[in-house]
Structure formats: structure tokens, C-alpha cells
Image: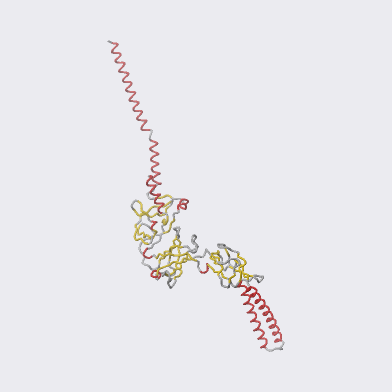
Amino acid sequence: MEIAIQKKTLWAGIAAVTLVAGTAGLLIGRSGGDAAPAPAAEEAGHADEKGGAEAREGFVEMTAERLQASGVLTSTVQPGSISTEIIAQATVAAPPEGQALITARADGAVVRIDRRLGDPVSAGQTIALLESRDAAAFVAQRNAAAASAQAARAAAAREQRLFNARITARQDLEAAQASRAQAEAELQRTQAAVQTAGVTDNGRYLAVRSPINGRITGVDTQLGAYVTAGTELFNVADPRRIQVDASVPAVDAQRIRPGDGAVVELPNGSTVSATVRSSTPALDPQSRTATVVLQLTGTPGGLTQGQAVRARITPRGGVAEKGFVLPEAAVQQFEGRDVAFVKVTGGFQAVPVTVGSRSGGRVQVVEGLKAGQTVVTTGAFVLKSQLGASDAGH
């Protein structure tokens, strides 16, 4: 009987020890489970804070290298109105001092051509040679005039000595002096003729020279060709000297005055500032438009003579409306709002704007922008795509 009671007591003690050990293990397990994730939670908190700083709402990060590679172009906005702008098709042209038509000064055969189409030339440089009988005639006239001038000088000097010695009358001296002056004038004329015709030193050839610096844009002759005086041989143009000729309807041309501001839109999306230099008083009989000459600011690159561009002219004195005029592509739809991308530190910020009237590919922004801000005018869709991709990732 005592043995049975001892066995029951032993089994009860073992059960109690087991229960205590299990409870302690459970408590240890819970304590370890609560403490382990603490470092991970701290890192997550830092990550959220960092991500919030980088992913500023509506901000697109853009370095200078990426900006150049993306083709995004910007422009500084200034107050303007679509109703006051005159949009016209225009052509890049050479001003009168920037082009030259070179002709033959006398009859002759082309025996040498030193420059080809597109080659650079400098003012006074020989482009070709003509073998001409007129060259010999010019030289002969000059030599004869030189001899006559020499004889007239000697006769006038002799008459001066005789007059001083009281041998001849004053009228004889005056006649000799008049003959000398006439001979000197003839010599100057023949020398100018030789120089103008481009007679070479040997008196056989006539040099065809360029009057300006530039490049050869046209060649209308070939070796061996016989040409007459006045025949067009070469065209030379200076690519650094350009102007823009805008074709403006007669009604709009009446509003334009010299000094009015203008902007020339280049095919790559960039713009160049210009001012109105002059306007033709008569209309072109073919297009029924007036030609407005625009003088570009500085010497911009990317413009070639003969290139077609578009010009926007803003006459002074027009009734200006509140707002800024931008290309339609500068305003993008994002999340149901019209936005424009304004340049900020490190990239571009999408700014909500209110759009007014639209015309000719231009849009007037009446709210949301400030004068002097730099706004994306070309490539805004690229920034919108990057902004959309960024929002989708978050």
C-alpha cells in the first residue's frame, strides 16, 4: 500500500516539472520572437523616409547628361496672347551683303576652275581664269595711256621752265597743264579697267574673283566654255549671314512695324529670338502676301539658307491678355489634369495649369505659371511617361 502511494507521488512530481519546463520554454520563445524583428522594422522605417524624399509628387529627376540625350528642350515663358500673335510661314534667306552672283567681265574661254561646289572662298580669291582677247586690249590701252601721261608731264614741265624764263606766254603753260591732267585721267581709267576686269600679270587671262567670304553655292560653267560679258558663272553665299523672310497676309502686315518682336521656330523644336527689320509695301502677285524681314538675334546654329521655318510675330500695341503662350505639346494630360513641366533643381516639376484658347498648334496658359520660369516646350511627353512609370512603380 505504501509502495503504491509513493509511485503516485513520483508521477505527480514528474508531471509538475514537465509543466513548468514547458511554460518556461513558451515564455522564452515568445520573448525571442518579439525581439528578433526589431532591426528589420527600423530599416523599413528608414527606407520609407528615403523613398518619400526621392519620390516627390510630380517630380521627375533629370541630370544634365540625360537631359541632353533625351531631346527635351526648354524655353523661358513671357506674358503673351494667342490673339496678338501673327503666325506665318517663312524662309531662311541670305541678306544682300551675304550673297554674290559672279559674272564674266569680258568675253573669253574658261581655261581653269579652282573651286568646286561647296568649297570655301575668301574675298578677292580667284575662282577661275578666262582666256580673253579683251585682256590684251585692256593692257594695251593702259600702256598707251601711261605713255601719253608721261609725255604730257614732260611737256608741262618744259612749258613751266619756259614760262619762268619769260619765253612763252601763260596760255601755253595752261594748255600744257590741261593736257597733262587729261592724260593722267585717261591713265587712271585704263588702270581701273585692268583691275576691274581681273587681268593677270601676263596680260593674257582674266581672273574671276569672289567679292565676299563664303562658300560656292552654284556653278554655271565648265572648262572650255566660251562665255560673253555678263554671263553668270558662280554663286557665293556666306552661311553666317542670314535673315528670315516671313510671308504675312495683307491684313496682318498692316499691324507690323519695324522693331516688333518675333520668334522663329526651328524644325528641331527649338526657337530663336528675332526682331522685325522691314516689310515690303507691296504684295507678292503669286501668294498675295507681304514679305516681312526678320533680323535674328546673334548668329544661331541650325539654320541654313533656303530652309523653311515658322515665325511668330508679336506686334507692339496689341491688347495683351493674361497668360502665357506655349506649344500645345508643352501641356500634357496627367491624372485628369493639364500640367506643364517647370525646371527645378535636379529635374522638372509637373505644375497644374489652366488652359485657355488654342490656335495654330499653340495654347494659352491662363493660370499656373509665372513669368521667367523655364518650361519644357519639346519633349514634355517623355517626362510625362517617366512620371507615369514612377507612379506605377510606387
In front here: 119 or 134? 134
Q: Is residue 332 visible?
A: yes
Q: Residue at x 63, y 79 (%)?
A: 186
User: From what the image shows, is residue 204 above or below residue 327?
Assistant: below
Q: Is residue 115 left or right of residue 7?
A: right
Q: Is residue 126 visible?
A: no
State which quarter of the image contains the C terminus. Answer: top left
User: From what the image shows, is residue 283 above or below residue 339?
Assistant: below
Q: Residue at x 31, y 17 (%)?
A: 11
Provide residue 160's location: percent of width, then percent of height: 69, 84
Provide residue 62's location: percent of width, then percent of height: 44, 50
Provide residue 28's location: percent of width, then percent of height: 36, 28
Provide residue 189's location: percent of width, then percent of height: 62, 77
User: From what the image shows, is residue 132 above or below residue 346?
Assistant: below
State which quarter of the image contains the N terminus. Answer: top left
* Picture quadrant of residue 217: bottom right
